[in-house]
Image: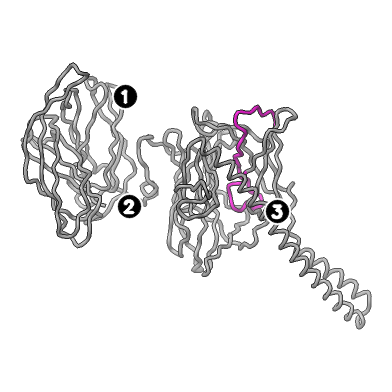
């Protein structure tokens, strides 16, 4: 997503409902798109968004007052009519009964229109100053945990913080609780911006005007059918699957998830808010959610975590009505997250795949490494990843190869870039650690991977190698050393025998020695889209890193 800084609207859907959800991160609350902006742009945008938010609040308050006035006018007319009716009835039944009925009728009318919720019903814990982010990009925030003790559901509850240096007022900042509806008895954290570069000695917190949702229905709490808390380095994510298992054919939408982290003392040390990937789902359908969690208090380990799912029913016109679950929707789990290597690229679908959808990583093999040299005679190794399955395609295979000298780690190599690997196919890999002479062992951490049945997702192409030409070249290093190396000019063509256009073709061209071992390879990425029945030529220079080549093989991908 991009943000139009002139109109402050989402670049994806045009909505102006933008919310800061992380460090220099803004989320569109309409479509869920996320934008990252630079620090100076973030500060300026936040100030403007505060102005927009305040103006929106003023307009909402004015609209609410207008509705209240209109309602009171209608109530006044109703009361007048009721008085007349009770007077007429009093002629026949007596003044005592008429007075009693008139009083009780007036009380019912007032109760029906009284939507005032005292702000002291939203209890605030003692605030804490925390740093969100890491290193020089960390920013100070005020962490406040609010609990709803009003006995009523609250819609978009907000908190305003007034900052002081001694008796001098410095600034005011406000923030909404990260849930659309805070149900009775529920708590929710909020991070409020603090003045940058100022000496804050104290702050005063004020609960903004409270109101119930205009409409709501009662329903069951929603739990994620599959849920995982995942940590990679400093990054923590909650991923889960949302299923519409309602039996009344109701369409559900407006999914939002709040995930909260706790230390062993029960203090909040991080939280994140996200939306379902699908805007709405029909009965029996499903969608997923991937929530990035802002972490603070990094010295404390994650001892427990919880999440809650808010959702709405969607009628035929597209109108949404929030579902209230009676305040029991928070689902808590003791224990920490699953940890993965930070270099792994973990997709939501990979993490949430059912057991039947998973590819067994034991069917992936890294062939013995081949010793070689680059064009300035530095040592390197060539490897190949092979799919040993006979009937399954592995989707988005990936892993991290850790290199060791004895028990000491000497760097890593990430296996990435493939959309799929078919049975028997070989994907070439370079390993180039800084100190190859001390390289003795490898260990692989595989990412969670999915499988696909044959024929799989790839569109068929016909790749032909029409010519090879061995040659030598040289390279000058630091204007003092010249090194000679061998390479092979490989030419050929790629033909599309199908009935549809094939685009974004990637082609790996590999050199092999007389024993079939890999001796060099190169990726060709500049191939154009290929129309049905047509072919395109390719020519590539492949550096020979090992023994003299005897044959050429290819591997291709399509999207």
User: Is residue 199 magenta-colored?
Assistant: yes
Viewer can see residue 539:
yes
Total marks shown come to 3
The numbered mark at residue 357 is 2
Name the residue beneath numbered marker 3.
151
Name the residue beneath numbered marker 1.
409
* Magenta span of residues: 175-202
Cα–Cα span, label 1 and label 2: 33 Å
Q: How is the model colour-coded?
A: one colour
Give the mark, 3 or 2, whose residue is nearer the N terminus: 3
Cα–Cα span, label 3 and label 2: 45 Å
Q: Position of residue 449 (x, y in %)?
A: 32, 46
Q: The residue tagged with tag 1: helix, strand or loop? A: strand
Q: Nearer the viewer, residue 46 or 299?
A: 46
Cα–Cα span, label 3 and label 1: 57 Å
Q: Position of residue 246 (x, y in %)?
A: 50, 64
For mark 1, does the 10 Å Cα neighbourhood hold few (<14), some (14 to 19), or many (20 or more) residues? few
Classify residue 87 as left or right of residue 134. right
For mark 3, does the 10 Å Cα neighbourhood hold few (<14), some (14 to 19), or many (20 or more) residues? few
Viewer can see residue 225:
no
Classify residue 551 as left or right of residue 34. left
Give the mark, 1 or 2, whose residue is nearer the N terminus: 2
Q: Position of residue 288 (x, y in %)?
A: 44, 53
């Amino acid at each position: 997503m991009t943000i139009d800084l002139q109109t402050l609207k989402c670049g994806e859907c045009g909505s102006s409902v933008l919310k800061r959800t992380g460090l220099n991160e803004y989320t569109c609350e309409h479509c869920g798109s996320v934008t990252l902006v630079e620090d100076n742009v973030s500060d300026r945008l936040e100030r403007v968004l505060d102005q927009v938010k305040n103006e929106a609040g003023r307009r909402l308050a004015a609209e609410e007052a207008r509705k209240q006035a209109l309602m009171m006018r209608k109530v006044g007319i109703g009361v007048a009519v009721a008085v007349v009716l009770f007077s007429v009835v009093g002629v026949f039944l007596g003044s005592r009964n008429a007075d009693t009925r008139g009083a009780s009728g007036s009380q019912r009318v007032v109760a029906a229109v009284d939507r005032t919720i005292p702000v002291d019903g939203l209890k605030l814990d003692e605030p804490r100053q925390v740093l969100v982010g890491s290193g020089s990009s960390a920013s100070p925030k005020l962490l406040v945990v609010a609990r709803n003790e009003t006995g009523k559901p609250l819609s978009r509850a907000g908190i305003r913080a007034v900052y002081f240096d001694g008796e001098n007022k410095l600034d005011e900042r406000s923030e909404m609780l990260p849930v659309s509806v805070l149900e009775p008895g529920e708590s929710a954290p909020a991070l409020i911006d603090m003045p940058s570069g100022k000496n804050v000695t104290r702050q005063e917190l004020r609960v903004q005007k409270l109101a119930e949702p205009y409409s709501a229905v009662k329903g069951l709490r929603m739990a994620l059918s599959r849920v995982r808390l995942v940590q990679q380095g400093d990054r923590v994510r909650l991923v889960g699957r949302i299923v519409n298992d309602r039996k009344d054919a109701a369409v559900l939408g407006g999914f939002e998830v709040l995930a909260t982290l706790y230390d062993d003392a029960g203090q909040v040390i991080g939280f994140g808010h996200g939306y379902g990937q699908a805007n709405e789902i029909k009965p029996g359908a499903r969608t997923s959610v991937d929530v990035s969690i802002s972490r603070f208090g990094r010295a404390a380990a994650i001892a427990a975590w919880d999440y809650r799912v808010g959702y709405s029913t969607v009628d035929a016109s597209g109108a949404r009505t929030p579902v209230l679950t009676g305040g029991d929707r928070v689902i808590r789990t003791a224990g920490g997250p699953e940890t993965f290597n930070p270099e792994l690229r973990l997709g939501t679908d990979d993490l949430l795949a059912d057991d039947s959808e998973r590819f067994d990583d034991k069917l992936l093999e890294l062939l013995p490494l081949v010793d070689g040299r680059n064009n300035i005679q530095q040592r390197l190794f060539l490897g190949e990843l092979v799919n040993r399955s006979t009937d399954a395609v592995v989707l988005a295979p990936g892993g991290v190869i850790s290199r060791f000298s004895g028990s000491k780690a000497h760097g890593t190599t990430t296996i990435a870039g493939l959309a799929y690997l078919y049975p028997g196919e070989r994907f070439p890999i370079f390993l180039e650690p800084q100190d190859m002479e001390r390289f003795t062992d490898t260990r692989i951490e595989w990412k969670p991977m999915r499988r696909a049945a044959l024929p799989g997702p790839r569109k068929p192409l016909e790749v032909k190698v029409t010519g090879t030409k061995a040659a030598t070249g040289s390279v000058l290093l630091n204007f003092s050393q010249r090194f000679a190396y061998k390479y092979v000019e490989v030419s050929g063509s790629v033909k599309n025998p199908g009935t549809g256009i094939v685009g974004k073709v990637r082609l790996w061209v590999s050199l092999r020695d007389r024993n079939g071992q890999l001796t060099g390879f190169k990726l060709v990425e500049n191939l154009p889209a290929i129309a049905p029945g047509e072919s395109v030529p390719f020519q590539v220079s492949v550096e020979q890193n090992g023994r003299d080549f005897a044959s050429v093989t290819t591997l291709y991908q399509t999207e």
